[in-house]
Image (cartoon, grey):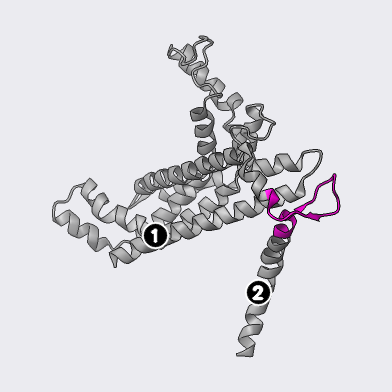
Amino acid sequence: MKAAYLYVAPLVIAIVGIGILPLGHAFYISLTDFSALRPEPEFVGLRNYQDFLTAPFFWNSVQVTTIFVVGTVVTEFLVGLYLALLMFGEVRGKKVFDKILFAPIAISPIVMGVLYSPNVVLDDLNTLLYYGLCISPICSDNTGVFLNTALPVVYYGMMILSDVFVWGPLMMLVILAILNNIPKEHFEAADVSGATSFQIFRRITFPAVIHSPILAAMIVLRAVDNFRAYEIPYTWSFWLFQERLGAPVDTFSVVMFKLLSSVDFPLSQIAAIGILLTVFSVTTAVVVMKALTKSWEGIR
C-alpha cells in the first residue's frame, strides 16, 4: 500500500506545485492592491472583484469571450462532423487527406490571426466582389468595401474562422474515430430495411456522435482552451486599431495583457481576472459534462 503512494506522490507534488500553489497565490494577490505604483501589497478584500462587476470593459470581455467560445466550439463541431462524414467509410486517398487536413494544427494561432486579417483576406475578397463580380457594397459611401471590418458580424466571423481552420480537423478526427466504432451491423440493418441516408444519419450516426463521452471531453477541452484565447483576438484588436480597454474584440486574456502593458502594472487586477477566468472555465466544463452525462444516462 505504501508503494502505491510512492508511485502517485510525484504526480501529486507536480499538481500542487504547478497548479494549486500558483492559483492560491494569485487568489491572494487578487485580494490586495498591488501594482507598480504600490509595490507593497495592501489587503483590500473583494474590492477588485467589486470594481470589475461595475466596469463596462469587464462585461464587454464577458460578452466577447462568450461569443468567441460558443461560436468556435459550435462551428468546429459542425465543420468536423461534415468533414468526418465525407471521410467516413472507404474513401480513396483517405490517409493523404487526413494528413493534409490535420496540417493547420501545426500553425501558430497568431499566424492565423494575420492570415485571416483584412489586409490578406478581406481586401482581396472585396476586390473580387466589387470589381470582379460587380456586386454593390453594403456600405453607403460606395467605396467598394463589401465586407466592412467595422461590422461585428465580419470581425467575429473572421476570428471564429481563424480558430476553426486550426482546430476543425482535430474535431474531424475525433468524430471520425467515433463513427468507425459504430457496429457495421447497424448500418447494414438500416440499409436492408430501406432507410434513406438522412434517416441513417438521424437515427444512427448523429446519436452515436452526440452521445459519445469522447466528443464531450473534446468539447470541454476546446471550450476551456478558447476561454483563454489571446492570439487571434489580440491580432484583430490591432487590425481594428483598438488599444483601449473595452474594445469590441477584448477577451479576458486580451484585457489581462492590456492591463499588463499599462504604466501602473495593476497585478492585483490581473490576478482577479485570472481567478474569474478560472471560475468561468471550470463552471462551463462542469455544466457541459453534467448535461452530457444526463444524455448518456437517458440512452442506457
Between discs 2 and 1, the one toward the N terminus: 2
Residue 292: which disc?
A: 1
Quadrant location of the C terminus in the rendered image: bottom left
Q: CA distance from mark 2 to mark 1?
A: 29 Å
Magenta highlight range: 26-48
- SS at circle 2: helix
- Quarter of the picture containing the N terminus is bottom right
Q: Residue at x 62, y 32 (%)?
A: 247
Dot 1 crowding, Cα within 10 Å, few <14, some 14–19, many 20+: some
- Which residue is more in the foreground, 57 or 216? 57
Q: Nearer the viewer, residue 109 or 261?
A: 261
**In front here: 212 or 279?**
279
Task: Report the front residue among 141 and 206.
Answer: 141
For the point 70% across and 63% down, the residue is 24
Residue 279, horizontal then vertical, whole percent: 58, 56
**Residue furthest out toward the bottom:** 1
* Labelled disc at residue 12: 2
Mark 2 is on which residue type?
Answer: Val
Residue type (three-letter) at the residue carrying disc 1: Leu
